[in-house]
Amino acid sequence: MAKTEEVEYQYLEIEGVHIRAGVCRRDGSGLPLLLFNGIGASMELLQPFVSEMKNTTVIWYDVPGAGESQPPPYPWRPKHHALLAAKLLDRLGFDRVNVLGISWGGVLAQQFARQFSARTERLVLAATSPGHLMVPAKLSVLLRMSNPLRYFSPEYMQAIAPKIYGGSLRTNKLRAKEHASKMKPPSVKGYYFQILSVMGWSSLPWLHKLKQPTLVMAGHDDPIIPLVNAKIMAARIPHSRLRIVDCGHLFLLTRAKVLAPEIEEFFLGKQVADL
């Protein structure tokens, strides 16, 4: 086990794949948070958000093929990724958790909440969609997202960040540069496996069966996941609330100081104020 600042890193073999996981332990009385990251993104990219979760123990990991985790032997379906996450919790000694997924990780969060309902207390779906049956982004955005080049070239990331992430990254070049500096390139094979894993998958047929209190969060200016997707999801999930943030796709990072404590209040069952 390695420890950097507040994060304990562990390297585990689960489902035949070597996984890097991290646990940031806090003294709060609430349940721990299982965090699912975006496509191709390593743990480091969500560190600013994790650092602002002052009262919540956070568990997150490099999805197979991202960061320091080994790619799976073939493209896993979301149910296989959810199974790996459940086994990871077992290995780390956690049972019931709150769950948060951002973007591609929101697909896994939905799948985990359905597949392991008894282990999921509350659910946050941030900048995500119901999968294959979503309202898509513009073709120019999809083309830029179709390959992992932005993770290998900080210069390219800075150049395209305003167009694919929107929000404050449209005008704040320093913020785009800071985001690019935290990148750890994924496996190219692993990136395309992540794309393939969600092809044909959709939660729309069963979103109405989710039992967990759910906070659906969306950026008002999100080129990757148009806002209408969040509205559809919130309308389909019984115990849900829609939160629209005046920012872009990366609002959990750009507004971490404001959103992290409010998400913690949601996990404790408190009312969250509108932004």
Image (cartoon, rainbow, N blue to C red):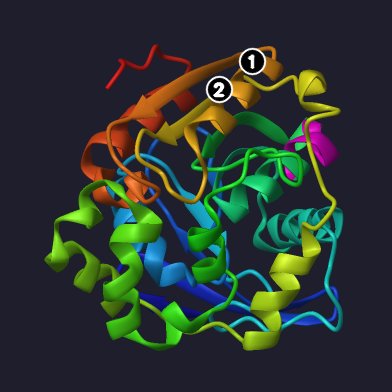
In this image, 205 relative to 132: left or right? Answer: right
Q: Do the CB atoms of the residues marked 1 and 2 lie less than 8 Å apart?
A: yes
Residue 65 locus on image (x, y percent): 66, 79
Q: Quadrant of residue 231?
A: top right
Look at the image and give the residue range highlighted in magenta: 112-117
* Foreground pick, 173 / 125: 173
Residue at 64% from the left image edge and 69% from the top image edge: 63
Q: Residue at x 27, y 32 (%)?
A: 246
* Image quadrant in which you'd find residue 182: bottom left
Pointer 2 residue? 231
- Around disc 2, counting alpha carbons within 10 Å, would you say few (fewer than 14), some (14 to 19), or many (20 or more)? some
* Main secondary structure along the magenta-highlighted residues: helix
- Secondary structure under the numbered disc 1 in the rendered image: helix
Q: Is residue 205 left or right of residue 234?
A: right
Q: Residue furthest front?
A: 139
221 and 86: which one is in front? Answer: 221
Query: Residue 174's spot in the image, x, y percent?
Result: 13, 67
* Camera-nearest residue between 236 and 165: 165
Q: Which mark is residue 235?
A: 1
**Residue 91 location in percent, x, y?**
72, 63
Q: Number of labelled discs?
A: 2
Q: What amino acid is found at the position of numbered circle 2 in the picture? A: Lys
Q: Amino acid at mark 1?
A: Ala
51 magenta-colored: no
Q: How busy is the neighbourhood of tag 1: few (under 14 within 10 Å), some, or many (20 plus)?
A: some
Can residue 32 be seen here? The reply is yes
Give the alpha-carbon distance from disc 1 to disc 2, as whole Å: 6 Å
- Does the magenta segment cover residue 116? yes
